[in-house]
Image (tube, coloured by chain):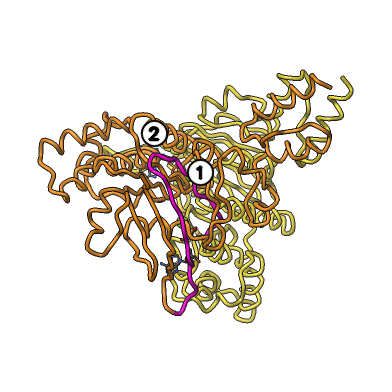
Amino acid sequence: MEITFKDVSYTYQPNTPFSHQALTNMNLTIRDQEFVAVVGHTGSGKSTLLQHINGLLIPSSGEVQIGSFVLSKGQKKQDLKKLREKVGVVFQYPEHQLFEETVERDIRFAMENFHIPKEDIQPRIMEALAQVNLEEEVLAKSPFELSGGQMRRVAIAGVLAMKPEVLILDEPTAGLDPQGQQAIMDLFYRIHKERGTTTILVTHQMADALAYADRIIVLAKGSMLMEGTPEQVFANPDLLAEANLDMPEVLTLLNHFEERFGIHIAYQRQSAHDLAKEMIEKLRET
Amino acid sequence: MVAIEFRDVYFRYNEDTPWVLKNFNLKIESKETVAILGHNGSGKSTIAKLANGLLMPQAGEIFIDDRKITPTNVWEIRQKIGMVFQNPENQFVGTTVRDDVAFGLENRAIAREEMLRRIQESLQQVGMEAYENHEPHHLSGGQKQRVAIASVMAIHPQVLLLDEATAMLDPRGKKEILATVLSLKEQLAITTVMITHDLQEISIADRVIVMNKGAIFKDTTTDKLFNSHQELQSIGLTIPLSVQLAIELEQYGYPFSTYPLKQEELIETLWKSHLKM
Ligand SMILES: Nc1ncnc2c1ncn2[C@@H]1O[C@H](COP(=O)(O)OP(=O)(O)O)[C@@H](O)[C@H]1O
Ligand SMILES: Nc1ncnc2c1ncn2[C@@H]1O[C@H](COP(=O)(O)OP(=O)(O)O)[C@@H](O)[C@H]1O
Ligand SMILES: [Mg+2]
Ligand SMILES: [Mg+2]
């Protein structure tokens, strides 16, 4: 589904002393089946932006279009349930929202809520469970008996079982160990590729933005500071520093290499093995 | 002096579940800076909770500052070992930063003047003195964790134990905590234990302990850690890019005496070898 923001501004608690404008004149198009990373310092408006995509927030001014749904202040009430069926959200720390007595009931919950045909539910649970790499045994357990990493997977399985066309991921790997982070990012990428899911990822990990995103959007103080392919965005270290963001490790390393040896190596998602090989080949040429 | 010692410790959460720690032994000397890493579920937080008496072992003994933890002295022991946990939201009790730091002191019946002095002192140590009257929940994640550290430091512990205290923070928050820990280390003769997955935090430690399934898998120094990269990978740890590249570059005859955690180190070693070729 294509997603368009037209002059979107959003103010929390308007007309009160606590009024706070969190988004200012956002213009943005996310193409169908695109993988977009949204990066920016804490408080820059990333979560606010995401919550507009499933109608959790309605723009204070401007309009958001998601497929055929239009969200704007003037718009008369629509069936947001239809939208939310298609837009799956993995919130920050989604395991905090688990509440059912068993894992199975937690994964089942959204599907029943959205009236997925009864006969589809069980197969979808099994499929989602396999996708997040959990054993069938956990279905009967209470989510609270599981480790933090397992609880995260249960919460994600509940979202995946809905087979959303759009996946919104708000720092989905925060707080996990490195291997757990890798496994979950690989999972989202695989689903994006296999199902053509339009994916919007909020992350602090520039390495993930570089590795997975077709396009990166940099937010600062509720506005778009920069957008472009990872190559374009990371060619702008000064602007990134302004947004309090780091460069991905592999790019700083290649920069150090270039400074020292005067040899440029373009990063094209090479493995460490291939990067080393390229370094050596170029060193031997000199 | 020994800051923390586990002697033949057995611990499990329930009688019908497996041992989380089985005949576990660990000794951390006073003033050491130690990083503990390992995959989720390897027993790191269990060690932390045993060390400050939140949990009691089913068998074996635990000593803090050479004193054995018993059910009757837990309260005194907690004065010696201050803990900061992962979630900054869960650690606040006061309505202002000052109240929050005061809370632990009031609980210990410390005289008012001394209390005020310590609040000042500990907020200064973490660089939060300007926020005394702020409400904790309006602070950034990194600031919240610094206040949590100040609350612990106000008790004057011998050991500061951080259990993934930066895992929920953004990059700036992580840097703030790292700088705070480094500065505490310089100002005070304190033992620091950091449970972490973060390479930068690991790189400021003198010693690194790698946990795997409730046992110590490696007990080594930071610079030697990745000498056993194959084993570390086999237990699911990720190898930093600079080390991965060093391993690959060795195949082409560029030697590394230690695997570099820092990119600059990698490039400099490569440069020196290159000049000799
Ligand atoms: N419910 C709310 N009420 C008032 N202000 C809020 C609310 N939620 C977020 N904000 C403010 O809006 C800004 C953007 O927040 P958010 O979108 O959560 O940022 P990010 O996800 O980039 O950290 C911040 O300054 C935040 O304090
Ligand atoms: N409160 C608890 N009840 C039952 N089992 C627990 C509890 N806390 C942890 N465990 C189990 O103990 C083991 C070690 O957990 P923990 O010490 O939290 O590991 P780490 O901190 O390294 O992730 C894991 O198998 C975990 O599932
Ligand atoms: Mg957010
Ligand atoms: Mg833990």
Q: Amino acid at mark 1?
A: Leu
Q: Answer above or below: position of A192 versus A207.
A: below
Query: Which residue is pictured at 50% across the width and 43% down the height?
Result: A49
- Looking at the rendered structure, the secondary structure element under dot 2 is helix
Q: Are marks 2 and 1 in contact (CB under 8 Å)?
A: no
State the image coordinates of residue B26 (x, y, percent, origin top left). 46, 55
Q: Amino acid at mark 2?
A: Lys
Q: Which residue is tagged 1?
A: A49
Q: Which residue sits furthest bottom? A: A119
| Residue A124 in magenta stretch | no
The chain letter under disc 1 is: A
Image-based side of B22 in relation to B229, left or right: left
The hue of chain B in the figure is orange
Q: Which residue is tagged 2?
A: B185
Label 1 CB-ligand 1 distance < 8 A: yes
Query: Which residue is pictured at 23% across the width and 56% down the height?
Result: B75
The hue of chain A in the figure is yellow
Whether residue B176 is visible to the viewer of this picture, yes or no, is yes
Image-based side of A94 in relation to A249, left or right: left
- The stretch in magenta equals B16-40
- Disc 2 from disc 1: Cα separation: 40 Å
Give neighbour class at mark 1: few <14, some 14-19, many 20+ (Cα, 10 Å). Answer: many
| Residue B22 in magenta stretch | yes
